[in-house]
Image (tube, rainbow, N blue to C red):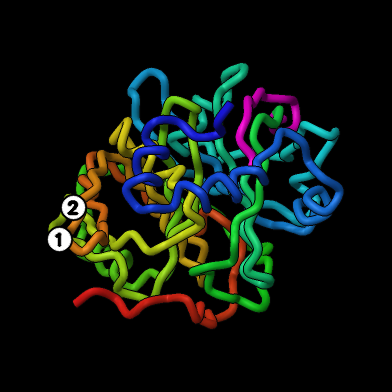
Amino acid sequence: MSVYHEGSLTLQEQSGLREAANHVGRAIGDGIKPVAAAFLELQPLLIVGAADPVTGRVWASPLSGRPGFVRATGPRQISVSGGVLPGDPLAPVLARQNAAVATLTLDPRTRRRMRLNGKARPTGHGLTIAAERVFANCPKYIQRRERYLWDPDARPGPAVRGHDLTDRQAAFVSASDTFFLATMGPSGPEASHRGGNPGFVRPASSTELIWPDYPGNAMFLSLGNLAMDPHAGLLFLDWTDGTALQLTGRASIESAADGTRRIRFTVTHTVETSAAVPLRWAEPDFSPANPAPPA
């Protein structure tokens, strides 16, 4: 049985990467290996992607804590201490039993990342996630940040909601070198990372963003989802002060005659929270894989 659904398979075929996708797809399993468990326990940041079953909106949200706040508590389960902020759009989703979620753990210090998807349930101290799909991704387009500080005085601000980008938010997006993408598809949610040199994401208007689809691991998990369901969520983090900008809306894939692709994202709702995470990261060393931003 293929680990891919129709949307991913179609894009793999169109790109001539079906064989490569079959090879990397063998790394997808349902268990947490000891090396993965050790990796999780060192991380202060976890990204969660999910859809609100009431509104249908897809969001990506940050969870943070001292290393050890995420840990494997069995061969197919992780435990997360704490949770999203009360005003986070995924708070009601994660309060449900057996919510379908996707998680991404990214370590800028080592340029490693790990994805774990499954079913979440709330506990008295946070949540647990029963793993259904676990795999690592390559370091491509991850900016190295060698260290971080934990700000013990950080106090998250209120969640400020809107329907389009302010000028300040658009400038923040334009200057970003990283964002996180949540999508939904027949196999459930996916949470992924997108990186590039500042300027790789371009606001076309107060309600529209465009970014190029850089060559990746041949899986086309996120794009495959978008080919089947356009709903998506984006998370931009300010690595210096912990501000989180969450966007939800609809995305479309635009293909050019030369085989390149770009994504056009229409914003429908925004949530901005100052000091959403207490992590203060060092300046980035940009990935050598980053192409020059589009003109």
Q: In which quarter of the image is the C terminus?
A: bottom left
- Residue 109 position in % (x across, y down): 67, 72
- Residue 70 position in % (x across, y down): 74, 45
Q: How crowded is mark 1: few (under 14 residues within 10 Å), some or many (20 or more)?
A: few
- Residue 50 position in % (x across, y down): 48, 33
Farthest residue, direction left: 205
Which residue is drawn at the image coordinates 53% and 73% (left, top)?
A: 143
What range of the chain is rendered magenta? 116-129
Amino acid bearing label 2: Glu
Instruction: In the rendered structure, find residue 208 and report the number of the disc placed on it.
Output: 2
Pointers 2 and 1 in contact (C-beta within 8 Å): yes
Which residue is drawn at the image coordinates 44% and 25% (left, top)?
A: 186
Which residue is drawn at the image coordinates 61% and 35% (left, top)?
A: 117
Q: Is residue 215 found inside the magenta-colored segment of the image? A: no
User: Which secondary structure is most common in the magenta stretch?
Assistant: strand
Relative to 108, say whether 60 is above or below.
above
- Residue 238 position in % (x across, y down): 46, 65
Q: How far apart are marks 2 and 1 (CA)?
A: 5 Å
According to the image, label 1 marks what residue?
204
Instruction: In the rendered structure, find residue 41 and report the number of the disc placed on it.
Output: none
Q: Quadrant of the N terminus?
A: top right
The reply to whether residue 160 is in sight is: no
At numbered mark 1, what does the secondary structure look like: helix, strand or loop?
A: strand
* Snapshot quadrant of residue 204: bottom left
Which residue is drawn at the image coordinates 54% and 48% (left, top)?
A: 62
Amino acid bearing label 1: Ala
